[in-house]
Image: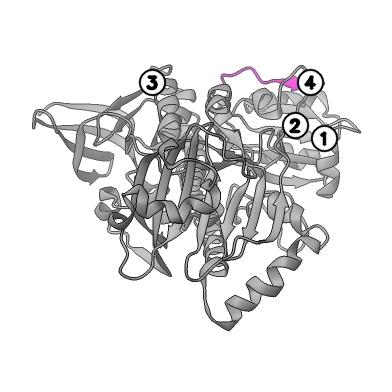
Amino acid sequence: MSERVVPVVIVGAGPTGLTAATLLAQYGVECLIFERWEGVYAQPRAVHLDGEIHRIVAHLGIAEEFAAISRPCLGLRLLDRNMRVLTEFHRDPGPGVHGYPEANMFDQPAFEEILRTNLERHPRASLRGGVEVTGLVDDPTGVRVDFTDRSTGAHESVRTRYVLGCDGANSSVRDHIQATMRDLEFDQRWLVVDVEITADLGEWEGAHQVCDPVRAATYMRIGHTRYRWEFRLQPGETAEDYRDMARLHPLIAPWTRNTPVDDLELVRVAEYTFRARIADRWRDGRVFLLGDAAHLTPPFIGQGMGAGIRDAMNLAWKLAGVLTWGLPESALDTYEIERKPHALALIRRAKFIGMAMTEGGELGNLVRRIVIPLLHRLPGLGDKVMDGETPALHRSTLVERPRLRRSRAGRLIPNPDLGQGRRFDEVVAGRFAIVTAISPTPKQRTDIAQRGGAVLLARPGTDLHRWLRRGHARAAVIRPDGTVLRSGNDLSALCTALPRFNPDRVPTTLQ
């Protein structure tokens, strides 16, 4: 049995695992991904990423590639069972606060191909497919990962400092740490249909939600010729009942009535059970859970894949700091503290939307008949529904949010254009930064540089200056993942709060 040593082993090469590996490799951390399958799973699953996740995709270096395979979604239309519009929320398809469209439709296999191709550009990350992880053995210095080559049956092992379980809803890594999934009491069976259509259906290019306790449905255009429908299955129905276009066509007919059946090509018909669950713990020593291994959400707000990618963004820089630049091991404790409440809040939001769409009874009927049609008339509600802002992260040693006054801490800084076509994220390049409306002294600049940080001077009239003022602050410490660690008016105190991180890079200072 051969054995090698690698700092981080990632189990699972879906979007979460590939994102974590790419981020670690960008920081110079060697990592190895084990994946059960040799190639990308060919069937579409997730179809939506918000502007915040598009921003992370850009951080991976594939913004242009992703833009080429995705299309902005123009908003949300709520319909009753007779396909009458109850209300409609429009979304600007242009760049939002994160610098990219706030809703992006795409085909998951195409996205995963881009992620894998991009990973090959990073020699410190490697992917081994056709491998079954069979065991994790902990000791005081690390973890031994046992695995089997599925093609040869050979048994091997590798030693590592940390293991990231990105192996999905049926996670073996979760079983290893004996974590259990807490059921949040949402369980619905849905039919998921992907269709290839050469003709343009001529439908409004936002998401359509049919609010009906008998046959709730969702329609989305996810590509130039690709369309997705989801229908809630009734008791006794299965996906097998709809694998024939003659049976399926009555369901999709409200959107395809002017399209000949022969022009419709079924890509996939599958049954999914939409669940709301969250793991009781996300870490055991050197082993972490990410993505569907840690949480499952109903798809009604399109945050399933995005939640896993957020996990990877939150944890990767902390692992790199601990492994390479002297961040204390306690920094890793903040992963679950920050991410679990955030994921739980989005799961509950998705569950609420799903219940509003699908629940029967007098209350559900009242909401759909009277309340929903009035929503678009409430000032500012449409903007709130469409802005895509997610909750602030909870307090931790890396989110210093005061209890008795307003603060930007825990929220993402915007990603504005800073000139010459470069956005905030490109300038900061994955380091800590101080954004300040107060001109730093030479000593403060030197201190920040010695800690490996960047300084961005927010001049009056700029987007960053307006952002600081709205947060009642004159300066803020920004983490490598774009989250505000701390904000306030005392620049000296904020400089002192800046952790030492990545000191070998030459910092960028914008005048």
Q: Which quadrant holds residue 150? A: top left
Identify the mark nearer the N-term, 1 or 3.
3
The reply, left or right, for residue 258 in relation to residue 34 is right
Identify the mark nearer the N-term, 2 or 3.
3
Q: Which quadrant holds residue 3? A: top left
Q: Amino acid at mark 4?
A: Gly
Label of residue 124 in the image: 3
**Which residue was labeled with disc 1?**
463
**Which residue was labeled with disc 4?**
419
Badges 2 and 4: C-beta atoms under 8 Å apart?
Answer: no
Residue 343 coordinates in the image, percent (x, y): 51, 55
Identify the mark nearer the N-term, 2 or 1.
2
Question: Along the line of sight, which residue is nearer the eye, 283 or 242?
Answer: 242
Label of residue 416 in the image: 2
**413 to 348, vertically: above or below:** above
Start-end of magenta stretch? 504-509
Q: Which quadrant holds residue 175? A: bottom left
Q: Could you tell me which secondary element the residue under label 3 belongs to?
A: loop
Question: Along the line of sight, which residue is nearer the eye, 149 or 269?
Answer: 269
Q: Quadrant of the N terminus?
A: top left
Q: Nearer the viewer, mark 4 or mark 3?
A: 4
**Mark 1 residue crowding within 10 angstroms, few (<14) / some (14–19) / many (20+):** some
**Mark 3 residue crowding within 10 angstroms, few (<14) / some (14–19) / many (20+):** some
**349 to 383, vertically: above or below:** below
Q: Amino acid at mark 3?
A: Arg
Residue 507 among magenta residues: yes
